[in-house]
Amino acid sequence: MAQLLNIEPQISTIKKSIMKKTFLILMTMVMTVANAQEVKQVPMISVSGEGKVKVAPDQVSISVSVETRGNNSAEVKKQNDEKIDAVIKYIKKANIAKEDYQTQRVSLNPQYDYEKKKTTFYATQTINILMKDLNKYDELMEGLVSSGVNSIGNVEFKSSKEELHKSEARKLAMKNAKAKADDFMSATTQKLGNIISVTDNTQAYYPRPMYAAAMEMKSFDGAGAGQTLAIGEIEIIANVSVSYLISN
C-alpha cells in the first residue's frame, strides 16, 4: 500500500503536464486560424497572352513504312527485311546523314480470317527521316517509293531555328498579355502593378499538310512520287497566363 501511495503524486504530475501541452496545442491552433482569417486578399488581375511567329520551314520530317503480308510468318518477315534493306541503301545513296534517319517501329502481327479460316501475317517496319534540303524532297520521295516504301505515315515541316522562333513567340505572348491587362485597367481608376506569376501554356504543334495523306494513298501503286511540294509557312505559337498586382 505504501508503494502505491508514493506513485500517485507522480501520476498526478504527468496528467497536469499532458493537460498543459494539450492546452498549448489548442491555443496555437486557435491563433493560427485567427491569423488566417485576418489575411486580406491581394487585388490582382489574370490574363492570357498569345504570340505567333510565321516562318518558312527549311526541314521536313518524314515517316515512311514498308508493309508486307502473306500466309507464312517467316517468309513475310524475310520479304520485309529485304525491302527495308533496299530502302536504307537508297537513303544512304541520297546522302542523308546517319543521324537523320532512324527505325521507329518493327512489327509482325497475325490476322485470322474466320470466313476463309486462315491466318495472314503482316510485317511492318517504319523509318523516320529528317530531310534538311527541301529542294530534294520530290526526288527523295520518288526514290523511296521505287525502293519499296508503300506507306507514308506523317510529314512534319520544321525550322532549324525553332528555338529562336519560340523565344520570339514567348516575348510576343508576354506583350500580348500586358496589352490586355492595360486595356482592362484603362476602364478603371486603378493601376497595373508588378507581375505575380507567369504560366507557360504552350503546346507543341506542327501542321500536317494534305499532301502527306494524298501521297500515302497513291504510294501503294507507286504513282505518288514526283509531285510538287507546297511548303508554305508554319506557325510557332506560345501561350501564357500572367497575373498582375493591382494598385490604387
Image (cartoon, rainbow, N blue to C red):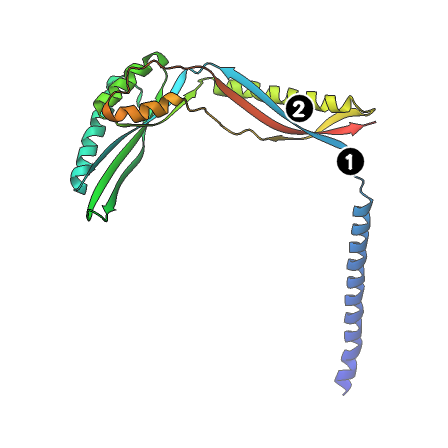
Which of labels 2 and 1 is toward the front?
2
Q: Which residue is mark 1?
A: 42
Relative to 78, is 119 above or below? below
Q: Quadrant of residue 228?
A: top left
Q: Which mark is residue 177?
A: 2
* Residue 96 drawn at (x, y percent): 30, 19
Q: Quadrant of the N terminus?
A: bottom right
Is any atom of residue 99 visible in this view?
no
Residue type of the residue flagged with mark 1: Val
Tell me the quarter of the image containing the C terminus.
top right
Secondary structure beneath label 2: helix
Three-letter amino acid code at the position of disc 2? Ala
Q: Earlier in the sequence, mark 2 or mark 1?
A: 1
Residue beneath the point at 73% across and 21% down: 183
- Marker count (numbered): 2
Question: At 25% across and 44% down in the image, what residue appears?
Answer: 111
The picture places residue 73, in percent across and down from the top left corner, at 19, 42
